[in-house]
Structures are given as C-alpha cells and as structure tokens.
Image: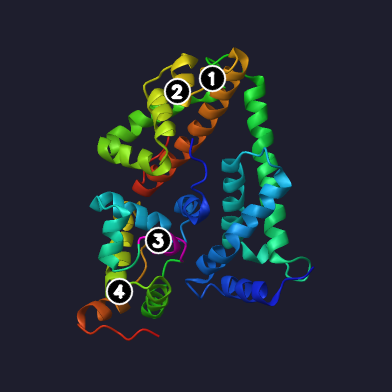
Amino acid sequence: MKATDKENDFHQRILARDDPIAFAAFAELFYDSLLQDVRRRAGSGADPVLVEEAVGGALLDYHDSPERYDPKRASLQSYLSMAAYRDFQNALAKERRVTGRQVSLFDPAFQEQDIVESQETIDSQLQEERLWQLIDQVFPDPTERRVVMLILNKTRSPEPYAHALGLCDLPYDERIREVRRVKYRITKRLRRGIAQQLDRIGGTMQ
Amino acid sequence: MNRSSSSLERLAQLAQGRPHLLAGALMLYKEQEGLDDEQLAALLRCEPSALTRLALCERPRPAPHFREDVERIAAYIHADLMQLAMLIRAAESREALGKRPGETSPDYGEFEEVHTDGEEPSDG
C-alpha cells in the first residue's frame, strides 16, 4: 500500500527541512499507533521498554534520513512499523545473547565497571547534583533509581537488586535471570544518558 | 516497575541525542538553570505538556529564517514568541560554549533584530 495523502504531506514537509514543526506534528499523530502496531507484532509478552525504544529509534532514524523512504512502495506507517519491529527483534536478540552467556553476575559482560568509571569521569566534569538530575531524568521510576544507586555503589551481590526489584519470592534461577536482565537494561540506559550528557558538555566516555 | 509512562516523553528523551532537534538544547538549558518542566513552561507561558512537542521540533534555521521558524514553533506549542526566541538563543549559546574550537553556532542576527526592536511580531 502506498503512502496516504496525509503521510505524503508529512513526508514532503520533513524532506524539505523547512518546517520546524513537521516532525513533531508527525510524531504526535503517529507515535501511538506505531507503538500499538509493534506491540501487536511483538506479542503480549514483549517488553514494553524495548518496544518503545525501537519505535522511538525508527522514528528518529526516519527524521534523520527521510530520503530512504519511498512513498510509492509502502505506507509510511508500514515502513516505520517494519523498521521498528526489526529494531525490536535485534535488541531482543542482543539482550538474549548477553543474558544467555552470563553464568555469573561477576561476568564483565555487564560492563558496570565502565559505568562506574564513567561516573568518576562525569563527576569531575559535572557537579554531583547535575549527575543526579540526569539520573532522575533518565530514570523517573524510583525502583529503577534504586538499582542505579546499587550499580554506582559497585554492589555485586544479586540479593540487594532482587530486594529492590521485589523479586525475592521468585525461585533462585529465575530471580538471578531477572536481576541480570534489569541490570543489563539499566546499565545500557545509564550509559546512553551519560554519553549524551558528556557529548553536550564536550567530554568523552572512558 | 512503572513501564507505562511511554507516549511522546520517551521519544523526546531519545531525541536528546539528535542534534537537529531541540530536545538536547532544552535539556541542557533546564539543567544549567535548575528548572523543572513546570518552571520552564511558566517561562514560556505554555502548558508543561507542550514541552515534549517542543523538544521534537527542529532547531530554527539561522537568519533569515530564524524568526519565521520560531513563530511557527511558538504557534504550535502555544508559547510566548519572545520568550521562546530568547530561550532557544540562550540554550544554543550554552551548547556553543561547550563546543570545541572551529565548530560554529547558528547566525542569530535576525534574532538580535527581534530582541532589540522591542515589538513582538505578530503570530502567523
């Protein structure tokens, strides 16, 4: 199915780069239905955070390179939905690879040490208060912030994480697996948040 | 864990790494001024919910399009034109201060005209 008239209109405005609100208006109109599309394709058990990140990434990639989309070949909604679903599958596969190969929370694949070192770097470049403002922005959820605190305090034992996440009632293997999954994802978001912050202030990540 | 606070806020957060959108500059300004969303919205005289849409707008083009672009954004988010123009200028100046030598900032000559002639241009 080709692009609808409305999609075509947005696409031309975004391509032209002369309308500062075109992308925002497009995202405002299409984001929720894209999210629903990808959730439906990903299945009810799909992690909503991964789905949102995939949809957001697909939209922003389209914003950066709208010329890659051909309105004669598919509707814009289908094009973005497929791109987002592909990103979701890639992210899921990557996460499974990481969690699958970990047999211990001490496995360096978590790269938490990098995060702790980055915190030390960022401490010297940012006020501590700003670091915590950044953390508050990236992690509005208080449970996630508790996990961030544990990571930054170099806590290695899984139990405090399981406690913070309310997972203590789960069987041991499942508890460990869930802790790894959450830590991996939070570490990834923290890393991205710090990298963006350093980028804005002209610093580099270790 | 609260995972339902999705909507455009998550997209605006992801957009902070995209240099052509306003999200990154706005975040830096908020951080440096110590403002929360309500305070920033009050400064711009718009609804706090409009800040997400603002973050997803393109950065205004340099003169001679700056004024036209800021007018368009202000109308879209129902914000005060002059306050928005000054905020964008301040946010991008702060970013420019953090840039390495050789990197350039947008030309805001047209904004200077807007800023100094004392009259608010009409919306539209």
Q: From the top left corner, tell me how far across and down residue A202 is, in percent.
A: 36, 46
The residue at which mark 4 appears reads as B80
Q: Amino acid at mark 3?
A: Ser
SS at badge 2: helix
Q: From the top left corner, tell me how far across and down residue A70 is, in percent.
A: 73, 67
Q: Quadrant of residue A179?
A: top right
Report the Cα–Cα distance between label 3 and label 1: 41 Å
Residue that appears at 58% across and 59% down = A31
The residue at which mark 2 appears reads as A113
The residue at which mark 3 appears reads as B49
Q: Nearer the viewer, mark 4 or mark 1?
A: 4
Tell me: A1 left or right of A77: right
Q: Quadrant of the N terminus of chain A?
A: bottom right
Q: Amino acid at mark 2?
A: Gln
SS at badge 1: helix
Q: Which mark is residue A108?
A: 1
Report the Cα–Cα distance between label 2 and label 3: 37 Å
Q: Nearer the viewer, mark 4 or mark 3?
A: 3
Q: Nearer the viewer, residue A36 or A95?
A: A36
Q: Nearer the viewer, mark 2 or mark 4?
A: 4
Magenta segment: B48-57
Q: Is residue A198 above or below residue A21?
A: above
Disc 1 residue crowd, few under 14, some 14–19, many 20+, Cα 10 Å: few
Q: Amino acid at mark 1?
A: Pro
Disc 4 residue crowd, few under 14, some 14–19, many 20+, Cα 10 Å: some
Report the Cα–Cα distance between label 4 and label 1: 51 Å
Tell me: A89 left or right of A24: right
SS at badge 4: loop
